[in-house]
Amino acid sequence: MSARENILARIRGQTGKSGATSEGELAAVHAHIARHLRGPLPSFAMHDPQEHFVKECGRLSTTLTEVADLADVPREVARYIAAQSLQPRCVGWQEFSTLDWQSAGIQFDNRATKPDDMIGLTGCFCAIGETGTLLLLGASARPKTTALLPETHICIVKKSRIVPTMEDAFALMRNEIGEPPRATFFVSGPSRTADIEQTIVIGAHGPYRVHVILVP
Amino acid sequence: MQVQSMHFKQTASTKLNDAVLQKALKKSKSKFVDGRALGVAEVDNWEDIRTYAAALRDRVIDNLDAYLIEFERNAIRRGAQVHWAETAEEANAIVLGIAQKNAVKTITKSKSMVTEEIALNGTLIGAGIRVMETDLGEYILQLADEAPSHIVAPAVHKSKEQVAELFMNAHHKPRLTDIPSMTREAREQLRSHFLGADMGISGANFIVAETGTTLTVTNEGNADLVTTLPRIHCVVTGIEKVIPTMEDFATLIRLLPRSAIGQSIVNYLTLTTGVKAPDESDGPEQMHIVLVDAGRTKLVGSDMKDMLRCIRCGACMNHCPVYQNVGGHAYGWVYPGPMGSVLTPTYVGIENAGDLPNAATFCGECQVVCPVKIPLPDLMRKWRERQFDMKLRPFGERAAISLWGFFVQRPRLYALATRIGARVASMMGGEQKLIHSLPGIDGWTQGRDMPAPAGETFRELYAAKSAAKQVAR
């Protein structure tokens, strides 16, 4: 017998069930999963998601600005880059390559992220008000490394895509995409560690800065 | 990992006199305990969420075979290869086999307690593969050649001076003095390893039956790099980690970081499902999932099955007065604190676990803070009973308990014996009403005096008071 059979048989034996796992038992599991039951929510999860998102971003050290139109994003990125004294160059997702980066004085590259890229620009599938979290779904035109390798991650968030809870984010994903893609990635602020003397340091292996630009 | 739990008493004594450790424990205690209290206080229905989470974990554990089969089916459908390991040795052989088959020379790892359990690094390094731990705490310990002393904060016992020393020697750079510089230096050192590794090994906080997804929770972002950059991703995890749906994860993630350190959410929730598409620029070409038993099935369906609900937050140890004073290494195996005192005897044998079930004051705080309501004191008590029955405790202790058992089952005899005992102890206390030395348990009186009882037992006082009341009426 294989390890798999032995382990499953031991589980059956220990729970007093005989024979192999039956079709009926598997059907019961399917039926339970299909209900997608939601657990109890804390009352703050029911607050206005956009308002709560802004507040939670502050707690996570995510900086945040709002622009009136998607076309204003390059100008806002230029302002942010200047304020941080960074080089006006970023690597970003394909969907933003048509924005007018040139007149904002920024070199925008749509390609796979290289280790020495300093700024990565992405969108997000949706954002979560309860915790100030960004949900990024990886795809060929939306590589995860853009949000991960550079020291600065700039994320464009549509205000209408801020949902109250993680449960809502998963429901949205199920409706629009179906199953989670290979790289499903929740980001809540810049990377951090407290592994030396429990002292929080911002900037571990991921970005040092996360900057959200809210667009309509 | 080599089991050293039988030396708990000796090691604990040493740890109590370790000044660096004591300072570290004091500091971390306030961060963990106060942090959790603040984090939990934000959630107005904390108890409801705990109850729901405990029930959802129970549902899976009671139908573990079906949920594992469902997880496996979906993981395979999404392109992962699923392996099953009954023992630590089998798990190590599977991972080594994957590495050798793919000519892997370098591996990056994100923190995984299961790989500590099975001592995977030793196997891989022994076969000539370079293995780099990338969680900052685990990296520090790899340099120090030490085991983690905490399941969430593995290097909690190290001072920044000790870390500075390790980094100076390993990185061949000037000694650093501040923690942000040390963190940056570790980041720079590890970057090239991340980028060059052939294989990434991660653990999993949960695996999701619905989608075949494995899920990792980190603040540093290292699990993301480990699961994204190398061409092979290998997950090593325990069979009890399966949960039905993404919604269940949403519930559990409300509990986990708050219980661990009081954070409302961790920085990165990393969900990985299958392998990269041909046109994707990042992601692994192969994904392997090793489902490890190594003792877990012994708990299924047993009187200790509640332990399988554990989500590895570390709150029980953070709040344990014994852990707070001796630290994690004293426990002598991978899992310290109350959860370790239940798991270690199960996984390595009660005969090797020595004093662990007794390394508790039974104050009950571990059960109070457990996000999935594991009755840890009850489970430790079960191990105590088993140790007694198996005659694994010292003769004197067993004789004393048997004697006590004899009296306690005979109420009149018990009343007489305690009457005599209370009077004798009262006389022993003398004028100062303090007993300086107790025959048979002189260890207890070595560092303190025992206050002498007044001379009458509770029952006598109770009877006298009742009688007085009757007279007054």
Image (tube, rainbow, N blue to C red):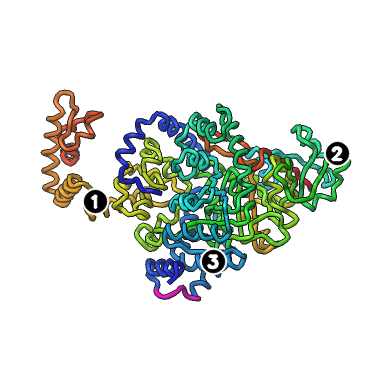
- What residue is at 41 percent from the left and 49 percent from the top? B1
As shown in the figure, which amino acid type bears the numbered disc 3?
Glu
Position of residue B299 measured from the top left corner of the image (x, y, whole percent): 38, 59
As shown in the figure, which amino acid type bears the numbered disc 2?
Gly
Please give the chain letter of the residue carrying mark 1.
B
Residue range (magenta): A18-23
Please give the chain letter of the residue carrying mark 3.
B
Q: Which residue is mark 3?
A: B72
Q: CA distance from mark 1 to mark 2?
A: 76 Å
Instruction: Let me know if marks 3 and 2 both belong to one chain.
Output: no
| Label 2 crowd (10 A; few <14 / some 14-19 / many >=20) | some
Using the rendered image of the protein, determine whether residue B6 is visible from the camera's viewpoint: yes
Q: Nearer the viewer, residue A54 or B18?
A: B18
Please give the chain letter of the residue carrying mark 2.
A
As shown in the figure, which amino acid type bears the numbered disc 1?
Leu
Using the rendered image of the protein, determine whether residue B269 is visible from the camera's viewpoint: no
- What residue is at 46 percent from the left and 41 percent from the top? B145
The reply, left or right, for residue A110 in relation to residue B470 is: right
Q: Secondary structure of the magenta portion, mostly?
A: loop
- What residue is at 19 percent from the left and 39 percent from the top? B458
The reply, left or right, for residue B432 in relation to residue A56 is: left
Helix, strand or loop under label 2: loop
The label shown at residue A105 is 2
**First reached walking from the N terminus: tag 1 or tag 3:** 3
Q: CA distance from mark 3 to mark 2?
A: 50 Å
Q: Which residue is mark 1?
A: B392
Q: CA distance from mark 1 to mark 3?
A: 41 Å
Helix, strand or loop under label 3: helix
Name the quarter where the N terminus of chain A is drawn: bottom left
Q: In the rendered view, would you say A171 is above or below B313?
A: below
Position of residue B38 measured from the top left corner of the image (x, y, whole percent): 52, 38
| Label 1 crowd (10 A; few <14 / some 14-19 / many >=20) | some
